[in-house]
Image: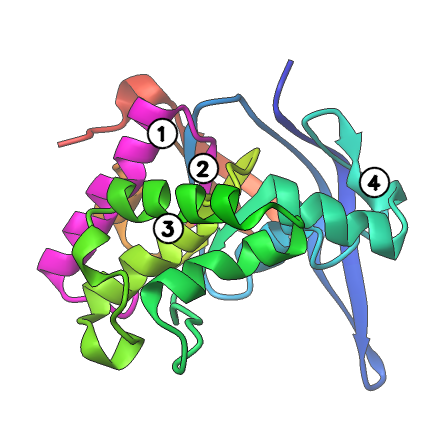
């Protein structure tokens, strides 16, 4: 059974007098422990799909099930609790809080889980070690490079041990070297830690790090490449 299962998902919204439908009757599955890249032109529905998977937005029609939970049926309060436990989100812009250290930024998702302080500190230390930033724990974002800031963002995304990780253009603001290091880290989280990752990217080289590439256009899946055809070099 798939960890992520979308059936007949449509998403529409109004902009003035016009109805926009970024996703149309979409079926989409992701197996546990796999890495899927989403590609397609701007406006094809990639980020809308990530927002539905994260519970940030709700489908107009159809169902979104993650780990057996139909997230479109959850109340606002239950959805917020589910999101805190189940989803780790990596943004292109890092979205770090500038006045907080790396340690404190990584701690933010755990504050929603009401864990004892000792447990929080242990999880944060483990997450920072996983991304190779133990020695930057007490640095502010402005004291770190873009690549280091993105690694802090990845540590924040994994610190609650989420069911699924979502990444929206995670290398879009990085140079080639830092981008390659970020992609290698994401690949390692899948291979060594068993994470399930869905990543939006416009970069074919970044997409090739995945087990599967899914292509969208005008809100529909129009093609894809399976694991056997993806070059992980």
In the image, which disc is placed on residue 77? none
Q: Give the residue at mark 3.
A: 155
- Say if mark 1 contacts mark 2, CB within 8 Å: yes
**Which residue is more in the foreground, 88 or 41?**
88
Q: Residue at x 55, y 65 (%)?
A: 43
Is 188 contained in the magenta span?
yes
The image quadrant of residue 164 is: top right
CA–CA distance in space, label 2 to label 3: 14 Å
Tell me where residue 46 appears, x and y as whole percent.
Answer: 54, 54
Q: Give the residue at mark 4.
A: 62
What secondary structure predominates along the stretch shown in magenta?
A: helix
Sooner in the amino-acid sequence: mark 2 or mark 3: 3
Q: In this view, does 230 lie to the left or right of 8?
A: left
4 or 1: mark nearer the eye: 1
3 or 4: mark nearer the eye: 3
Tell me where residue 127 appears, x and y as whole percent.
Answer: 35, 44
Tell me the magenta residue range. 172-199
2 or 3: mark nearer the eye: 3
CA–CA distance in space, label 1 to label 2: 7 Å
Q: Give the residue at mark 1.
A: 190
SS at badge 3: helix
CA–CA distance in space, label 3 to label 1: 14 Å
Q: In this view, does 169 lie to the left or right of 180?
A: right
Q: Give the residue at mark 2.
A: 197
2 or 4: mark nearer the eye: 2
Sooner in the amino-acid sequence: mark 4 or mark 1: 4
Disc 2: CA contacts within 10 A as few (<14), some (14-19) or many (>=20): many
């Amino acid at each position: 059974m798939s960890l992520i299962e979308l059936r007949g998902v449509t998403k529409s919204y109004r902009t003035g007098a016009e109805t926009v439908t970024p996703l149309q009757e979409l079926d989409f599955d992701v197996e546990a422990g796999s890495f899927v890249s989403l590609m397609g032109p701007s406006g094809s529905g990639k980020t809308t799909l990530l927002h539905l998977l994260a519970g940030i937005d709700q489908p107009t029609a159809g169902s979104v099930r993650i780990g057996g939970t139909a997230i479109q049926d959850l109340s606002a309060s239950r959805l917020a609790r589910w999101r805190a436990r189940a989803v780790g989100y990596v943004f292109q812009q890092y979205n770090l809080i500038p006045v907080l250290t790396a340690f404190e930024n990584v701690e933010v998702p755990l504050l929603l889980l009401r864990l004892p302080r000792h447990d929080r500190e242990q999880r944060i230390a483990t997450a920072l070690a996983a991304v190779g930033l133990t020695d930057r724990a007490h640095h502010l974002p402005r004291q770190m490079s873009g690549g280091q800031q993105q690694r802090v963002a990845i540590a924040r995304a994994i610190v609650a041990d989420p069911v699924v990780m979502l990444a929206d253009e995670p290398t879009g603001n990085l140079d080639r070297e830092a981008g390659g290091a970020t992609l290698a880290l994401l690949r390692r989280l899948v291979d060594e830690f068993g994470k399930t990752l869905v990543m939006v990217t416009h970069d074919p080289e970044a997409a090739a790090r995945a087990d599967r590439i899914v292509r969208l256009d005008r809100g529909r899946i129009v093609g894809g490449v399976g694991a056997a055809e993806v070059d992980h070099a």
